[in-house]
Amino acid sequence: MSLLSYPMPLERYCRLLPLLIGGILLSSYATTVIAGDKIYSWTDAQGVTHFSQQPPAEQGEVVTLSTQQLSPAKIGTVTPKRYSTTQADAATYSALSKQTQADKQQAELICKNARHSLSMLNTHPRLAHKDPQTGHQIILSDAQRQEAIKQAKSRIAQFCQPQ
């Protein structure tokens, strides 16, 4: 039979309690001794700062810190800084605003032209356009008309805002 199958008597608990308390006290003392150790700080030839509980092998300028002298930094106490706009930021914002306004006007013009083209293609079955090389009038075939309708609808979807 295993020892775990029988409940432990109360007297045995009472005998183990001082050992348990002693172990807790001993471990807390050990952590305070460890927390009181020295920390060595030095900068190597490449300019990298090192921190260690062991002194460096190379002799140079070493700063010894005691962990009891160090205090933990407060967490969450830094207030965010307000973003301040400079004149350069304002000029950039103004230029972007003007460009955005010009883009909107261009999109409105493309939208207006695409809607007009779609209206013309839907209402007039026989449309003609001027050939840019010869300057002659050419009547659109049915396939060309359908392709022009498709392109006009695509431009409307791309440049027109929903109404």
Image (cartoon, helix red, strand yellow):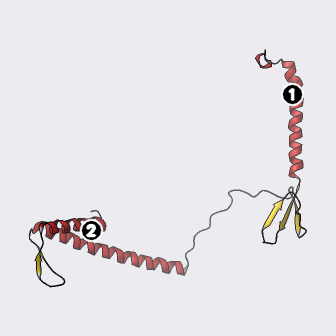
Q: Is residue 124 left or right of residue 6?
A: left
Quadrant in which the C terminus appears: bottom left
User: Horizontal placement of 85 versus 38: left or right?
Assistant: left
Classed neighbour count for the residue bearing mark 2: other residues with Cα under 10 Å, few (<14), some (14–19), many (≥20): some
Inspect the image, locate mark 1, and give the three-letter code of the amino acid beneath it: Leu
Q: Residue at x 16, y 81 (%)?
A: 131
Residue 62 placement (x, y as % from top left): 88, 67
Amino acid at the residue labelled 2: Arg
Q: Which mark is residue 17?
A: 1
Label 2 and label 1: CA atoms lie apart by 84 Å
- Taking the image as shown, residue 136 lies to the left or right of residue 75, namely left
Tell me the SS state at disc 1: helix
Q: Earlier in the sequence, mark 2 or mark 1?
A: 1
- The residue at which mark 2 appears reads as 155
Using the image, tell me which numbered label, if any, was put on residue 59.
none
Q: Which residue in the rendered view is the most extreme toward the front?
A: 134
Q: Dot 1: within a 10 Å radius of its alpha carbon, few (fewer than 14), some, or many (20 or more) residues?
A: few
Q: Position of residue 150 (x, y in %)?
A: 21, 65
Residue 103 screen position, x and y as percent: 35, 75
Question: Judging from the image, what secondary structure is the residue with disc 2 in?
Answer: helix
At 23% from the left edge and 68% from the top edge, which residue is drawn? 151
66 is higher (above) or lower (below) than 61: above
Q: Nearer the viewer, residue 76 or 107?
A: 107
Residue 12 is situated, as x and y percent measured from the top left of the image, at 86, 21
Instruction: Name the quarter where the N terminus is drawn.
Output: top right
> Residue 82 sits in which quadrant?
bottom right
Q: Quadrant of residue 21?
A: top right
